[in-house]
């Protein structure tokens, strides 16, 4: 249902679990590590629905963020070295590949 591939960038390494999946209605947390994050970097999560290109799902420069319209939360600790995307009750239409990335 959900897949989360490992991703690396040239400027700052970003690592995800090789695979995370769940069933409809069962919450899921997808973790991302970005230990070399820079001061100006934003933490961004993208979603790629089947047959479509990636689209920005949520982003933040710092701090956790509620996703009321998506029934979930993006967790980011004070040091910003990791983030976690939590989807509390995913539905079939949320089935996608989720990527984390850093950008400015």
Image: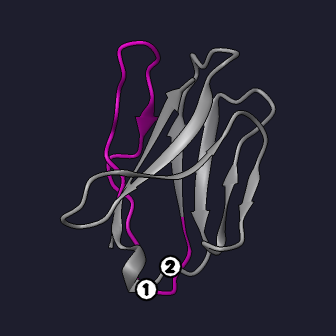
Q: Looking at the picture, does residue 80 appear above or below residue 95?
A: above
Quarter location, residue 89: bottom right
Do the CB atoms of the residues marked 2 and 1 lie less than 8 Å apart? yes
Check disc 2 and report its element: helix, strand or loop: loop
Range shown magenta = 3-28
Q: Looking at the picture, does residue 79 appear above or below residue 98?
A: above
Image coordinates for residue 91, horizontal then vertical, percent: 45, 84
Q: Is residue 61 left or right of residue 33?
A: right
Image coordinates for residue 51, horizontal then vertical, percent: 18, 65
Badge 2 or badge 1: first in the primary sequence: 1
Give the quarter of the figure containing the C terminus: top right
Res. 24 mark: 1
Q: Residues within 10 Å of mark 1 (few under 14, many from 20)?
A: some
Magenta-drawn stretch contains 23: yes
Q: Please report the residue visible at 76 percent of the width from the left and 48 percent of the height from the top.
A: 64
Residue occupied by mark 2:
90
Q: Residues within 10 Å of mark 2 (few under 14, many from 20)?
A: many
Give the quarter of the figure containing the N terminus: bottom left
Q: Please report the residue visible at 42 percent of the width from the left and 41 percent of the height from the top.
A: 16
Image coordinates for residue 31, horizontal then vertical, percent: 53, 48
Q: Looking at the picture, does residue 79 appear above or below residue 5?
A: above
Q: Looking at the picture, does residue 16 appear above or below residue 53?
A: above
């Amino acid at each position: 249902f959900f897949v989360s591939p490992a991703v690396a960038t040239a400027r700052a390494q970003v690592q995800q679990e090789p695979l995370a999946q769940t069933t409809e209605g069962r919450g899921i947390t997808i973790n991302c590590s970005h230990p070399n994050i820079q001061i100006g970097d934003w933490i961004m999560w993208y979603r790629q629905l089947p047959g479509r290109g990636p689209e920005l799902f949520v982003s933040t420069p710092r701090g956790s963020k509620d996703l009321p319209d998506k029934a979930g939360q993006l967790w980011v600790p004070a040091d910003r070295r990791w983030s976690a995307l939590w989807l509390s009750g995913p539905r079939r239409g949320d089935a996608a590949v989720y990527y984390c990335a850093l950008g400015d």
